[in-house]
Image: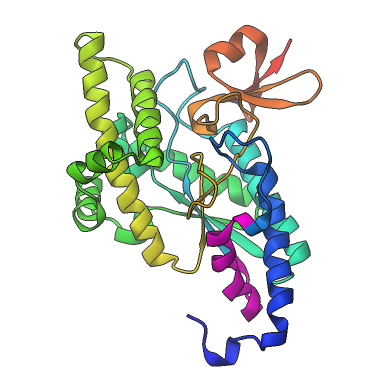
């Protein structure tokens, strides 16, 4: 909360609003949404984000954003190049850091984005070992340092619960913050479109990412539907924990968000699928220089593999 000493005088309110709208104007071209309306809303349509931005702008403080994501690579080798970050993460991190730099031009105190890596929150549900998630997170931190991305930092369960075993960390977060499955089902039955789309999207990802399953296709679908509820429960719990640790931040999301939502969906890279992310795909660089996310199996048909420091990085179109 702002102290009285930091509250702006009434005459400054219009300038503060203009700055907040200028910040949102930089975000809006990258909005990730499922809205059918082809016309992009103006900043004034982003009420929740304006309300979050204004106190920091009025105080002359840096703006803070949180972005849950960057969990780990998909376990499906037809989608990704391995379990470590590659060109997809590098480009996404550069984009986010550059976005903060552009915000600094309209709000000189600047901005930062806290990447709230959620891999350990639901790693057991998506079939990724904690060791792979640690390696991915450590490599992200190294990438942020080596690229000089001064506006970004990583935040994960290690920052919250230290060196406890990961199963215990997950259990604590779930017990304290997760909604019940019955509550989630009730929201979907009541017509909550955001929760329904999230449930369907996560179910699809789990089905595609399951490397091996001893059962029928229909049994796998049932299993994925059950795990999808668990992933949503843990994701909601992680969101509550993020809000505790970063109460002033504007909440970004890698998932599509409807207009006027409390979270602002943001697109990290060009992709034909609004649900696709760098950790579910790899990069194909087209001959005109354009970069696009797609499944590894598709990129392999269109391009040749490029290595970066001895590791698979991306594909270049033939």
**Res 278 quadrant in image:** top right
Does the magenta-highlighted stretch encompass residue 173? no
How many numbered dots are placed on residues in this image? 0
Q: Give me the residue at 39% from left, 38% from top.
A: 193
**Where are the magenta residues, as a range?**
45-63
Q: How is the image coloured?
A: rainbow
Q: Position of residue 235 (x, y in %)?
A: 34, 46
**Could you tell me if residue 147 is visible in this image?**
no
Q: Nearer the viewer, residue 314 or 281?
A: 281
Q: Position of residue 131 (x, y in %)?
A: 34, 38
Q: Position of residue 185 (x, y in %)?
A: 23, 38
Does the magenta-highlighted stretch encompass residue 54? yes
Q: Give me the residue at 41% from left, 20% from top.
A: 76
**Could you tell me if residue 96 is visible in this image?**
yes
**Res 62 quadrant in image:** bottom right
78 left or right of 284 in image: left
Q: Residue furthest bottom?
A: 5
Q: Position of residue 209 (x, y in %)?
A: 37, 22
**Magenta span: chief secondary structure:** helix
Q: Give me the residue at 65% from left, 30% from top.
A: 270
Q: Residue furthest right?
A: 288
118 left or right of 167 in image: right
Using the image, determine if residue 132 lies above or below residue 242.
above
The image quadrant where one finds the C terminus is top right
Q: Nearer the viewer, residue 67 or 87?
A: 67
**Res 272 quadrant in image:** top right
């Amino acid at each position: 909360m702002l102290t009285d000493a930091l509250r702006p005088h009434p005459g400054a309110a219009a300038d503060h609003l203009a700055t907040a709208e200028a910040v949102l104007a930089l975000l809006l071209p990258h909005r990730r949404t499922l809205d059918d309306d082809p016309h992009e809303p103006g900043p004034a349509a982003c009420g929740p984000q304006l309300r979050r931005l204004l106190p920091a702008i009025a105080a002359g403080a840096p703006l803070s954003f949180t972005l849950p994501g960057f969990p780990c690579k998909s376990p499906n080798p037809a989608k990704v190049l391995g379990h470590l970050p590659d060109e997809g993460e590098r480009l996404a991190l550069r984009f986010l850091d550059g976005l903060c730099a552009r915000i600094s031009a309209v709000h000189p105190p600047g901005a930062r984005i806290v990447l709230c890596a959620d891999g350990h929150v639901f790693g057991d549900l998506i079939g990724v070992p904690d060791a792979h998630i640690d390696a991915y997170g450590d490599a992200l931190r190294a990438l942020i340092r080596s690229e000089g991305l001064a506006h970004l930092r990583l935040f994960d369960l290690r920052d919250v619960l230290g060196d406890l075993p990961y199963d215990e960390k997950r259990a604590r977060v779930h017990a304290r913050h997760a909604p019940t499955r019955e509550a989630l089902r009730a929201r979907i039955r009541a017509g909550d479109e955001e929760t329904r789309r999230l449930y369907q999207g996560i179910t699809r990802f789990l089905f595609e990412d399951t490397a091996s399953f001893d059962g029928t296709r229909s049994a796998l679908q049932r299993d994925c539907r059950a795990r999808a509820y668990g992933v949503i429960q843990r994701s909601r719990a992680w969101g509550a924990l993020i809000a505790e640790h970063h109460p002033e931040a504007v909440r970004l999301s890698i998932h599509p968000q409807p207009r006027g939502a409390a979270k602002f969906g943001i697109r990290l890279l060009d992709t034909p699928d609004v649900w696709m992310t760098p950790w579910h795909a790899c990069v194909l660089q087209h001959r005109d220089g354009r970069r696009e996310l797609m499944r590894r199996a598709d990129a392999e048909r269109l391009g040749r593999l490029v290595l970066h420091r001895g590791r698979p990085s991306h594909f270049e179109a033939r």
